[in-house]
Image (tube, helix red, strand yellow):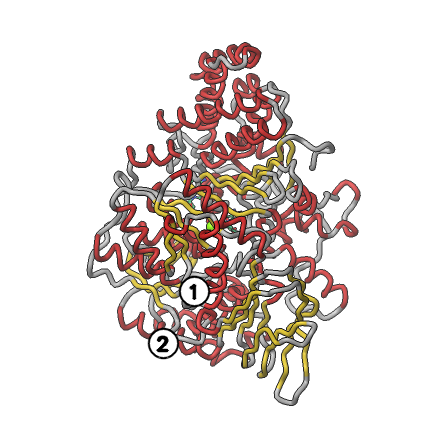
Amino acid sequence: MADSRTPDIVYTIVDEAPELASASLLPIIRSFASAAGVTIGTKDISLAGRILAAFPERLRDDQRVPDDLAELGELVKTPRANVIKLPNISASVPQLNAAIRELQAQGYDVPDYPDSPSTDAEKDARARYDAIKGSAVNPVLREGNSDRRAATAVKKFAQANPHRMGDWSADSKTRVASMSGGDFFSNETSVTLKDAATAKIVLTTADGTEHVLKDKVAYPAGTVVDATYMSADALDAFLADEIQRTKDEGVLFSLHLKATMMKVSDPILFGHAVRAYLAPVFEAHGDRLTALGVNPNSGLGDLMSRVKDEPEIRAAIDACLKERPPLYMVDSDRGITNLHVPSDVIIDASMPALIRGGGKGWGPDGKEHDAVCVIPDNSYAPVYDAAIEFFKANGKLDPATAGTVQNLGLMAQKAEEYGSHPTTFEIPQDGTVRMVLEDGTVLHSHDVKAGDIWRSASARKAPIEDWVNLAIERQKATGYRSIFWLDENRAHDAELIAYVKPLLQAAGVEDRFEIMAPREATIASLETITRGENTIAITGNVLRDYLTDLFPILELATSAKMLSIVKLMQGGGLFETGAGGSAPKHVQQLQSENHLRWDSLGEFCALGESLRFLADQSGNAKARVLGDGVDAATQGVLDNDRSPGRKAGEPDNRDSHYWFARYWAEALAAQTDDADLAAHFAPVATALADGEATILEELHAGRGQAVDQGGYYHPDAAKTASIMRPSATLNAIIG
Ligand SMILES: NC(=O)C1=CN([C@@H]2O[C@H](COP(=O)(O)OP(=O)(O)OC[C@H]3O[C@@H](n4cnc5c(N)ncnc54)[C@H](OP(=O)(O)O)[C@@H]3O)[C@@H](O)[C@H]2O)C=CC1
Ligand SMILES: O=C(O)CCC(=O)C(=O)O
Ligand SMILES: [Mg+2]
């Protein structure tokens, strides 16, 4: 439930592992903050919360919840915003269906997700669910550009305690496969609008009929507007070819997309791959599969559940899986393949995990193998291709000596591809798509065929300027090698370069920056950090996402430990907790063995920043003392190795929160800036130290056994609290 008055800091209620962690950590934060008069409110941006908020008229009064995401979306446009944002699920259709089923079983009368809506009621439900689907939270809250880097203490810890990296061998067969043409990259056109304008997107078919795909798309002056398309024929030919080549090379076949953030285009690309891999099955049984409601975009998992009573089709699938190259597995123990669920392989996390592992993926035999990594579009695939070739040539990175790659990402106001969903279309008939302004100017024109995916993306002037200024600021603060990852031969990037160069010149700093295409920038950055030096990658939105997993996973083993600051353009602050996601595998482990390996370091880093931001915002000096105490506690967790272990039997997330609370209390008791806070926390620190043995024993009771939260997407709060807060002694001290 949302708090009734505006709190100093808003902490988000989310899903999966981070929400489990919050059940333990948030009471500690609230208790400590209250000593400084700092209030912490919550807003529910979980998948289940967003579904319930979308259908108030179907729910009983006591079941209704406010639209917290909409409220937060307004808050971030104000200078008083101070939000700690944890990762939430960006749902694929199979996840959305599972969440809906769970809520229905709990007695909430939310409608089914209509696969093929025909009635008005179904079309309405579909429109509401489509707004919830995919990455529907982050774009709403990110009213600022992104500054992600490892805090100095975190980077130093990683260098002193290097994680294990898989070995790369020069003859590894692992490679990236991308299209040689016909993709978004090669078809892109881009213009910068001189004046504010409104556009419509029209498909003209062979008989001259005009179909308006979208009307009244408004842009302010200075917006960079791109358009491009992916040819379905070229994609299918490429996939068929790569499946055969992978088979010949004797390695795993894997597909890496971002079906969550690219929620319109990438599920379609995923569906093409499912269809291509199972081509013999679709050829022989296509009509029956259609009759069973199979949609390849939902993946092999959904398909298998629909053909469970069709032995002939199941046999054809088994034969196909034997005949085709072995699939890269998400979970080989449970038979979950790369093509099962579109949200199971998310490129930003999946490619770095494979690269960190020496180019290996898990096969159906439960063993590691080299893999072909299919990334159809060429816009950003060269980053992974270059990284893989770099490690084949030079061997793995050494985290003990490697420098760091920080990131400044153009993200505000739905910048670039991640904001392109309302203007992305699967083309229904052959024809020409034109983007036309009100005065008749044709901005873009592409000849397309049925099945092609056409999209327009845009980036506004104010966010672009803010991003360049942030880059100038960070370069000045660090002196690091600073590279704009922009390709002068790519249409969109050329328009951005036309912004960047004059801004750098006007500031007299053009000699401090380089501009390089993604492939060259990857190589230059890897060379730089291999020498132990640091660099700032100044990138667009997609590379922001990709690089803030890639480099942290290589340097720190995880992107969860990143500092992730969004300086909101209206003056507020959004503090994201790391750069990683909601770690579904961690929930499975908690449920089966009551061990939560989630590391809350990202929450700790965000909390420290948020408290200091509050001090600047409100003049509450105690908030700064609290924030500095958080940093000392974070340092304590690192220095004393109090982060969670991976395996049941080792200390977990709950243990790490006990230590965090203790180090925080000790730091507050020891500081001399605020005597009241020191006096308040001295007995808390003593009680936490005296209670150590009892608290740890209570925290460990029941570890190793299965636990039930009473739900996955909409768990029971009391059950979750009893699992995550099992120490009566700790709870009493926290109060
Ligand atoms: N900001 C946001 O809101 C984001 C949301 N997401 C969402 O998260 C979900 C999962 O995405 P996925 O691509 O699997 O990526 P995740 O980052 O959630 O998971 C990949 C792996 O990273 C490791 N990891 C991530 N966070 C932590 C942590 N705090 N402590 C320890 N290890 C961690 C885990 O490795 P191991 O299993 O080896 O322990 C995990 O399995 C999706 O629904 C996605 O949409 C994804 C990214 C950002
Ligand atoms: O919004 C999402 O789905 C994921 C966001 C993400 O991966 C990121 O910002 O790093
Ligand atoms: Mg990401």
Dot 2 falls on a residue whose secondary structure is helix
* Residue at figure coordinates x 47%, y 14% from the top left: 671
- Residue 344 shows in this picture: no
Circle 1 or circle 2, nearest the eye? 1
* Residue at figure coordinates x 44%, y 78% from the top left: 234
The spot of residue 544 in percent (x, y) is 46, 52
Left or right of residue 693: residue 354: left
Return the disc, 1 or 2, that comes first in the chain's sequence. Answer: 2
The spot of residue 262 in percent (x, y) is 53, 60
CB contact under 8 Å: marks 1 and 2: no
Dot 1 falls on a residue whose secondary structure is loop
Find disc 1 in the rendering and name its residue.
379
Residue placed most toward the observer, 49 or 318: 49
* Residue at figure coordinates x 61%, y 39% from the top left: 571
Find disc 2 in the rendering and name its residue.
241
The spot of residue 480 in percent (x, y) is 35, 43
- Amino acid found under the numbered disc labelled 2: Asp
Residue placed most toward the observer, 5 or 434: 434
- Residue 677 shows in this picture: yes
* Residue at figure coordinates x 51%, y 11% from the top left: 682
Q: Against 259, is 538 above or below? A: above
Res 429 label: none
- Image quarter in which the C terminus is found: top right
